[in-house]
Image (cartoon, rainbow, N blue to C red):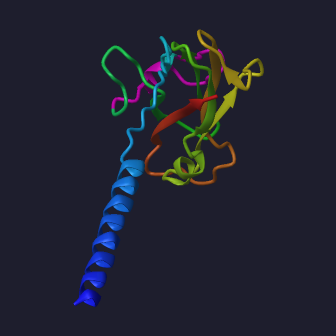
Amino acid sequence: MERKRDVRNVLMVALVFAIVVMAVGYAALAQRLTVNGKATIGDAKWKVRITDISFNEGSSNISSTASTQAFDPEEAVVGEGSTGAKFDVTLGAPGDKAVYDITVTNLGTIEAELKEITDLATINAADPTDIKFTVTPASENAAILAASATHKYTVTVEWLATAEEVPAVTEKTAVINFDYEQA
């Protein structure tokens, strides 16, 4: 009998000890973790847009009525402009070209950098293949487009003078996007 009592006492002590260990473990793991801090971007604003597209008559050998240019309607937010331009050009003969001057402005407060220009190889591979689009940045373009600064580009659409056949269609439409990212 005394042996049963000793076993019972040992079990009770073990049970009390286990409860104490579990309570201490729970208390240690259940402490409140408080993280204090504040982060703001202030009045930072991202807004890179094409602000001007103009037909360059002096460098072109077609009339402006044979071409149209506009902000990319798929991308433009009303009154906001876009970073894409749509060109629809009709050329009359090999050697004809239309030249456009594009101005991209950083209207925001965050510096921007040109990531890429629409894949011109894909545009130029589309029919008619003898009509090619090229984009040339102005020599004064800096690598980084600072707030309130501009980048200038020239878009040339040209019917190659070396073309041997006159295609059934002498018109080509392309959307060229200037993709900028945070510098």
* Residue 50 x, y percent position in the rendering: 50, 20
The residue depicted at 29 percent of the width and 77 percent of the height is: 11
Furthest-front residue in this view: 2
Is 55 within the magenta?
A: yes
Which of the 4 image quarters holds residue 7?
A: bottom left
- The x and y percentages for residue 46 are 49, 21
Q: Nearer the viewer, residue 137 or 97?
A: 137
Pick the residue in front: 81 or 63: 81
Camera-side residue: 113 or 14?
A: 14
Residue 181 in view in this figure = yes
Query: Residue at horizontal 50%, vertical 18%?
Result: 41
Q: Is residue 55 above or below residue 124?
A: above
Write down the quadrant of residue 65 in the picture. Answer: top left
Residue at 47%, 21% in the rendered image: 38
How many marks overall? 0
Q: Nearer the viewer, residue 183 or 58?
A: 183
Quarter placement of the C terminus:
top right
Residue at 33 percent across and 23 percent down: it is: 77
On the question of residue 91 being in view, the answer is no
What is the x, y in percent for residue 181?
A: 57, 32
Q: What stretch is highlighted in magenta?
A: 53-73
Most extreme residue toward the right is 139
